[in-house]
Amino acid sequence: LAKGEIKLYRNDGGGSDGYVWVKNLKTKGVSRIEEIYSLKRGLGSIMMEDAKRFAAFNTIELKVLDFNERAIGFYLKHGFTEVSREEGKKKNNILMRYIKGENKEQLTLF
């Protein structure tokens, strides 16, 4: 995964099992997870660790819809914390943040 690119995760048959897109925002000094999508159980955790490792900055942010409880739980499990809520006409986003070396991953499993 080059900085700011998408990494595809392929299965043994060559098909796609998921992807993660990390964008590095030089002007803000923040890496942002634009999208993370997994079809395979357990792959999301691998993808998240890859995203953390390949992020150019210590601060990593992402946005998640406030009703997506499963995703919110996943991000909390991986050390992200809620920073703020953004309300819009059609959807409400939660801004979540992870800071390398400061956040501690929770050891609880779903």
Image (tube, grey):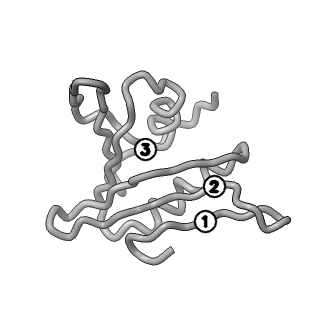
**Dot 3 or dot 1, earlier in sequence:** 1
Q: Which residue carries the number 1 mark? A: 8
Q: Quadrant of the C terminus?
A: top right
Q: Tell me which corner region of the image, top left, top right, bottom left or bottom right, holds residue 90.
A: top left
Q: CA distance from mark 3 to mark 1?
A: 27 Å
Q: Residue at x 70, y 60 (%)?
A: 16
Asked which secondary structure carries label 2, the reply is strand
Q: Residue at x 63, y 55 (%)?
A: 18
Task: Give the side of residue 30 with respect to residue 15, left or right.
Answer: left
Residue 64, percent from left and from top: 38, 36
Q: Nearer the viewer, residue 84 or 110?
A: 84
Tell me which amino acid carries mark 1.
Leu
Asked which secondary structure carries label 3, the reply is loop
Residue 96, percent from left and from top: 32, 40
Decide: is 75 above or below 24: above
User: Badge 3, how many Cα within 10 Å: few under 14, some, many 20+?
Assistant: some
User: Badge 1, how many Cα within 10 Å: few under 14, some, many 20+?
Assistant: some
Q: Nearer the viewer, residue 49 or 26?
A: 26
Task: Give the side of residue 35 with respect to residue 40, left or right.
Answer: left
Q: Residue at x 25, y 60 (%)?
A: 30
Q: Which residue carries the number 3 mark? A: 104
Q: In the orientation shown, which residue stands out farthest toward the right?
A: 13
Q: Which residue carries the number 2 mark? A: 18
Residue 2, percent from left and from top: 45, 77
Task: Give the side of residue 15 with respect to residue 59, left or right.
Answer: right
User: Badge 2, how many Cα within 10 Å: few under 14, some, many 20+?
Assistant: some
Asked whether the residues under the numbered discs 1 and 2 touch, taking CB atoms below 8 Å apart as contact, a structural biologist would say: yes
